[in-house]
Amino acid sequence: MRAFTLALAILTCFASPSLAGDRVTLGFGRLFSNDYLGDGSDRWRTGSYVVSWLRGPVGTESRGNFGEVLEYRFGTAVLAPASLTAPAADDRRYAGVLSVGLHSQFNRGALELSTGVDLVMVGPQTGISDFQEETHELFGATVPSPAVVANQIPDRVMPTTLVEAARPFALSPTTSLRPFVEVQAGAETFVRVGGDVLIGAGFTQGLVMRDGTTGMLYQGARDLRGTGLSFLVGADVARVAHSAYLPTSDGYALTDVRARARAGVQYRGERYGAFYGVTWLGEEFEAQPTGQVLGSINIQLNF
């Protein structure tokens, strides 16, 4: 759990008053994704959770200039072979991932930009494999075998940079098309292009961030106007040059294109809200026989 302690120390440093200036909390965004909520399996990109803490000047309702709105991002993920007890020799190795980072959400003309750096930690140091074993035992699910855990991706700490540029086009007062380009270097190095159609105030107002696993957009502003249903449909493709989770030294061959497709619905009431979405993830390495479907959820309660 050394990596977890380090992550908390970094978050504490980010949150210190000396660095925060006159910023206030604008809201929190979060998204939980798991294949049990999708295709019902327990494999490959099996689960993830991301939390974003947004800080900015009082009254901020848009991205503003670079550095004005800061996002403190914390994430976890579990990557696993198709079988947690007897994996195929050419299946992916288990990986527990923990990340913490600092990003800025800002505008440049008509573009919506996000850029930042994450410290990505992988291996037994994260404590993810121990946590999954305990939760699976609690709910009666399959527990990773000692051999799978022993063969997991070893301890590493990888600085990772990410830049996204999106250009919304209004199709109506409540509907927009939002194509984007994303470039990342570090734990995984790739170039990704895609887009989303957003319908309703839940996605066309406020500040939205993109989940790294599914590509789902999730809302981070807490004081959105309007209630009711909002919808999201999107897709993207990536060319991946490097993945620490699928090392070529182990004989993995990355797929030429990594594709994703997603759809979701969000309801916002006066005091609460809920989101559910599904994402199809294409194959990530040549020996992966098929894609998978993840489900994503988010519950918002306003007190």
Image (spheres, rainbow, N blue to C red):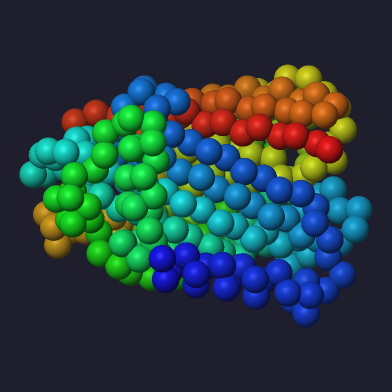
- Position of 255 relative to 274 (above/below): below
- Which quadrant of the figure has residue 242? bottom left
Q: The N terminus is located in which quarter? A: bottom left
- Position of 73 relative to 132 (above/below): below
Report whether residue 106 is seen: no
Describe residue 303's horizontal placement relative to residue 214 as left or right.
right
Instruction: Give the residue drawn at x 31%, y 62%.
Output: 124
- Which quadrant of the figure has residue 179? top right
Instruction: Give the residue drawn at x 73%, y 55%.
Output: 54
Q: Residue furthest right?
A: 59
- Which quadrant of the figure has residue 180? top right
- Position of 55 relative to 221 (above/below): below
Q: The C terminus is located in which quarter? A: top right
Viewer-side residue, 81 vs 287: 81
Q: Residue furthest bottom?
A: 18
Viewer-side residue, 131 vs 88: 131
Report whether residue 228 is seen: yes
